[in-house]
Image (cartoon, helix red, strand yellow):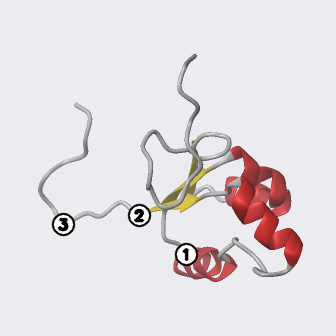
Amino acid sequence: MNHGPRAGGLVALTFDADMTDDMLARLRSGKVESYANVRIIELLERGKVPATFFLTGKWVQRYPELTRRIAGNQRFELANHTFGHQAFTPGCYNLPRIPRPG
């Protein structure tokens, strides 16, 4: 079985915490203050709501303390979302493309 029960009205909350080189550049330039949505984490913590966070390696590097906070919550699960979140196809949310094998 690769899914939960189909009956019972349950929902799984998942969140992507992405970081690309372009996003890092916007942070460094001051165009963007943060890509960490602490308000969502606080809301989930207060409500004791379980959730899964898919984190990119670059996001973890940028927000190590917040990553430790998420990892320390027994209701939260962490999952890998690649290191730098690249795309296989052009025009995919302005993500950088994975180079074609050469």
Q: Which residue is rendered at x = 35% and y = 60% of the image?
A: 12
Give the SS element for disc 2. loop
The residue wearing badge 1 is 44
Query: On the image, which quarter does residue 63 sit in?
Result: bottom right
Question: What is the count of numbered marks?
Answer: 3
Q: Distance between the residues labelled 1 and 3?
A: 19 Å
**Between residues 53 and 34, which one lies in front from this camera angle?**
34
What's the mark number on residue 87?
none
| Label 1 crowd (10 A; few <14 / some 14-19 / many >=20) | some
The residue wearing badge 3 is 9
Q: Is residue 22 above or below residue 28?
A: above
In the rendered image, the quadrant that contains the C terminus is: top right
| Label 2 crowd (10 A; few <14 / some 14-19 / many >=20) | few
Residue 69: x %, y % from top left: 75, 62
The residue wearing badge 2 is 13
CB contact under 8 Å: marks 2 and 1? yes
Q: Which residue is rendered at x = 16% and y = 62% of the image?
A: 8
Residue 52: x %, y % from top left: 50, 55
Residue 88 relative to residue 27: left or right: left
Mark 1 residue type: Leu
User: Which mark is in front, 2 or 3?
Assistant: 2
- First in sequence: mark 1 or mark 3? 3
CB contact under 8 Å: marks 1 and 3? no
Mark 2 residue type: Leu
In the rendered image, the quadrant that contains the N terminus is: top left
